[in-house]
Amino acid sequence: MKLLALWLLPVLPALAQYSVHHEGDVVRLEDGKRATTVSIMPKHGNSAFDMRVKGKKVLQNPYADADAFKGGRGLSGIPFLAPWANRLDEAAFWANGKKYTFNLDLGNVRPGQQNHPIHGFLTAASQWEVVEAKADGNSAWVTSRLDFYRFPEFMAQWPFAQVIEMTYRLKDGILEVHTDLHNLSAEPMPVAIGFHPYFQVNDAPRDEWTFGIAARTEWMLAKDLIPTGQTRPIGEFLPKPEGGTLKGLSLDHVFGDLIRDGAGKATMWVQGKSEKVEVVFGPNYRVVVVYSPGGPGRDFICFEPMTGITDALNLAHRGLYKDLQSVAPGQRWQESFWVKPSGF
């Protein structure tokens, strides 16, 4: 009778490995098998502001909760830098042989130090809409869309009609960030976007972190951090770009000529004792800006995927930069980068 009773028990479904949770303004992706979570706030710049493995932080996040993150402008998460990343050398940019001057009275472009606007004006944009947030047997993902062309205050500063879609996908403990730019304009649209992720490991102090920068050249910078157009081999600045420690280094440097594998991907990394974070750049991210200034409260390193160097728009117009990307009218630009933690 006992054996018969066992056969009559209901069969409970196995818990799904991947899931998506909505908590107010936050969408959280979860990989239960690998105890990995990623939290995204679409209505605040569509930024992934928290990533953890077994409760340990992969992304620098000094905020107590999502509301504190929304109210702050600190160094954390994965800010999206668009429609241009990093500094411009004036409050204007060049595209297709024409100069476009910003309307600073609108308030969404700040002139910055030495009249160098920085990081575009979408880092806290609230106009993103979630298109899809799902999980299946292979991954968990959220896709959000920004109809850039619908907002006059955007078009006044960057007069290229476009739609931006971004998908955060968590699969096998790895976060993919995929970006799609659809140019709806009648002219080619320059592509000068980037991301500014803040990474950390937890099992060693910053001075003991080792790192790897898969690049061959450094772009020389003037005092205002604008590239001069000159480059030098990375080894002249970093004798050990693979496997050196951060001790004594203050980094805010631009590197190019990335070292890629057979699939065209380039991998940067930081490691403590056993914890490691690898950041894999797809082929259309052609530059890495590495930012790790050190000092109290600055235990992080940024491997920033960039489509071009700092001030790429204006330096390309002057003939000092040859690798500016663009997307033709009606066409799309797409690329991904991946965040791969291990040893947590």
Image (spheres, rainbow, N blue to C red):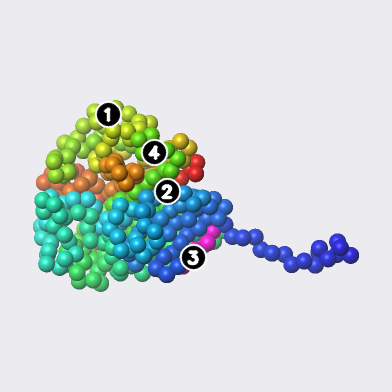
Residue 295's label in the rendered image is: none
User: Distance of mark 4 from mark 2, alpha carbons?
Assistant: 14 Å
Label disc, if present, on residue 235 of the rendered structure: 1
The amino acid pointed to by label 3 is His
Indicate whether residue 20 is drawn in magenta: yes
Q: CA distance from mark 2 to mark 3?
A: 20 Å
Residue that badge 3 annotates: 21
Name which residue lies at 23% across and 71% down: 151
Say the numbered circle drawn on residue 58. 2
Q: Earlier in the sequence, mark 4 or mark 2?
A: 2
Asked if labels 4 and 3 touch by Cβ distance under 8 angstroms, the answer is no
Tell me if residue 2 comes above or below residue 213 in the rendering: below
Amino acid type of the residue that numbered disc 1 sits on in the rendered structure:
Gly
Q: Is the N terminus in the top left, top right, bottom left or bottom right quadrant?
A: bottom right
Q: Is residue 323 visible?
A: yes
Residue 253 at x, y = what percent? 24, 40
Boundaries of the magenta span? 18-22
Is label 3 in a helix, a strand or a loop? strand
